[in-house]
Amino acid sequence: MKKILLAIIALFTVNIYSQNSSGILPYLNVSTGLSPINLVYVQAGTNIWQKTDVSNLILPISQINNLQTNLDAKYPLIGNPSNFLTSITSGQVITALGFTPYNSTNPAGYIASFTETDPLFDTKFATKTTTNLTEGSNLYFTDARARAAISLTTTGQTGLSTYTSGVINIPNYTVTAGTGIGVSSNVITNTLPDQTVVLTGANNFGVSGTYPSFTLTQYIPADNIVTRTINSSTYTISATKIATVKYNIKITCTASIGSNSSGKVLFQYSTNGGSTWVDAGEVENSNTVSLAIVLNSTTTQSGFIVWNVPANALCRLVPTTTGTTTITWIRGQETY
């Protein structure tokens, strides 16, 4: 405000008159124009009026105080007494200020003249709070409003958690009990603890030890020369490993005029204790004499039975003969 008043005063010629011998009180005469400010006074000891430029003016303290008192009374800073500002034009105000002040048609220009470091900005705006301003449709941010804008749902039982327009959805996951697992009041329990763990060796792997420490041992198959009885009796080759058998058997058949003979050896195994049997291999021979060329005829046939036998299986060699037949074990090898 002081800046504007000082600028306005600079626009005019201001004549100040001191008291003369006739008792004239000091008064201020204002006329329009852009002349410098001039002061008129009476030279001490004379009745001669003197007019001087402000820059050359030297007045006694008593006269300056008297001048200030009369100026404040006649032309206060508030209001417009005696139409003091009536003759001032807007162009003169703009020239004195150096910028266009705010009006209804130029709010942007007014605001643009302020900066964040402008004292007027600091004192007028920096102290304002949301209490002093109207919100309108774009509400102020507060912690309470942020919390109230978010809600929680528990829709569904599978999938990931989601967030959509202020709604957080966490599925109500359901845990279903299974074998050895119990679920009650969101607590999962082991209903079958300390179960026995059994490892069984197979395919040339052996297992030793007890829970929780077991040892697996790989066996290198070994060839074992054996002799087996061909009379349907049962035997086990290996209780823990697969075995490969190679049996060499000879069958001799003798026939006379008008007769025949035959023989067969069948190798079988069972994995269910003999309830059912699997035919794995056989050796067979036969002989028939139909013409009286010779009194007797003998034929001999030898063959091999080769098979892989499961671990702990029952095995047997089953012979079948007719006429005069002889079955001979030649050699045998079992590898496991």
Image: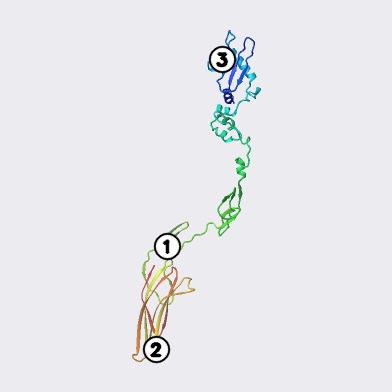
Judged from the image, the secondary structure of the residue bearing numbered disc 1 is strand
Residue under the point 35% across and 82% down: 300
x and y, in percent, of residue 305 in the image:
39, 75
Please state which of residues 117 and 306 is positioned toward the viewer in this rendering: 117
| Residue type at the position of mark 1 | Gly
Say which residue appears at 39% left-offset and 71% top-offset: 245
- Which mark is drawn over residue 51? 3
- State which tag comes first along the sequence, 1 or 3: 3
Q: CA distance from mark 2 to mark 1?
A: 54 Å
Q: Observer-nearest residue: 51 or 305?
A: 51
Residue 182: image location, x then y, percent: 58, 56
Q: Which residue is mark 1?
A: 206
Locate residue 258, reporting x and y percent. Answer: 39, 90
The part of the image, by quadrant, that contains residue 259 is bottom left
- On the image, numbered disc 2 is attached to which residue? 259
From this view, report whether residue 3 is shown above or below residue 143: above
Across and down, in percent, residue 186 comes to 59, 53
Which comes sooner in the sequence, label 2 or label 1? Answer: 1
